[in-house]
Amino acid sequence: MTADLAPISVSDRKKWFDASSHEKYPIWIIADDDQVIGWCSLGAFYGRAAYQHTAEISIYIDETTRGKHVGTQTIQFLATQLKQRDLQNIVAYVFRQNTPSMTLFKKQGFEQWGLLPKVAKIDSRHLDLAILGKHFD
């Protein structure tokens, strides 16, 4: 579940994609037998120098792959990429009502660092945004 309320085109994402070509904050494709089933990325957190060792994680995986541990493998892979990018912390923004994503991150040791109640409205539903985080020392 994303916070986009209308379909997003490739051209809509070009600026984001070009910015993510930065070595510190890449985008990775998740594939299974040459079939793209998702993507993951690291992004700058908050934009101030004191936060340079913290990154925001984004993961999008096709729902048809649930139960195959793709999300777990993805987070474990990203953890191996942090040291070379001088990153020590990961922050994830997850709708608290998104039970599969909340469960995935919590199983990987992420804790809830914050909660923004009812900050989003999708299809007349008010959603809470959980801020999850993990230190990788």
Image (tube, grey):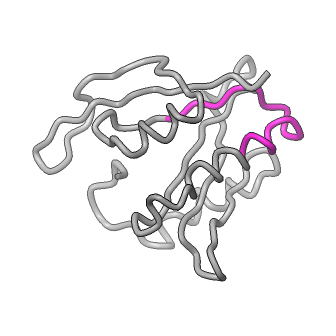
Which of the 4 quarters of the picture holds residue 46? top right
Q: Vertically, is 102 above or below 71? A: above
Q: Identify the residue at image location x=14%, y=51%.
A: 123
Q: How many marks?
A: 0
Q: Vertically, is 110 above or below 15? A: above
Q: Please provide the residue range marked out in magenta.
A: 78-92
Farthest residue, direction front: 67
Q: Is residue 64 magenta?
A: no
Question: Residue 89's x, y, as percent?
Answer: 69, 26
Farthest residue, direction left: 124
Q: Identify the residue at image location x=46%, y=58%.
A: 67
Which of the 4 quarters of the picture holds residue 90? top right
Farthest residue, direction right: 84
Q: Identify the residue at image location x=43%, y=72%.
A: 9
- Left or right: residue 50 compared with residue 47: right
Q: In this view of the protein, which residue sits in the foreground, 47 or 52?
A: 52
Q: Is residue 87 magenta?
A: yes
Question: Residue 34's x, y, as percent?
Answer: 66, 82
- Left or right: residue 43 compared with residue 6: right
Q: Considering the image in quadrants, where does the C terminus appear?
A: top right
Q: In this view of the protein, which residue sits in the foreground, 130 or 80?
A: 80
Which of the 4 quarters of the picture holds residue 44? top right
Q: Vertically, is 18 above or below 24? A: below
- Left or right: residue 99 compared with residue 83: left
Q: Vertically, is 92 above or below 67? A: above
Farthest residue, direction bottom: 34
Q: In this view of the protein, which residue sits in the foreground, 22 or 112?
A: 112
Question: Residue 105's x, y, as percent?
Answer: 52, 36
Q: Identify the residue at image location x=33%, y=42%.
A: 98
Question: Residue 2's x, y, as percent?
Answer: 37, 51
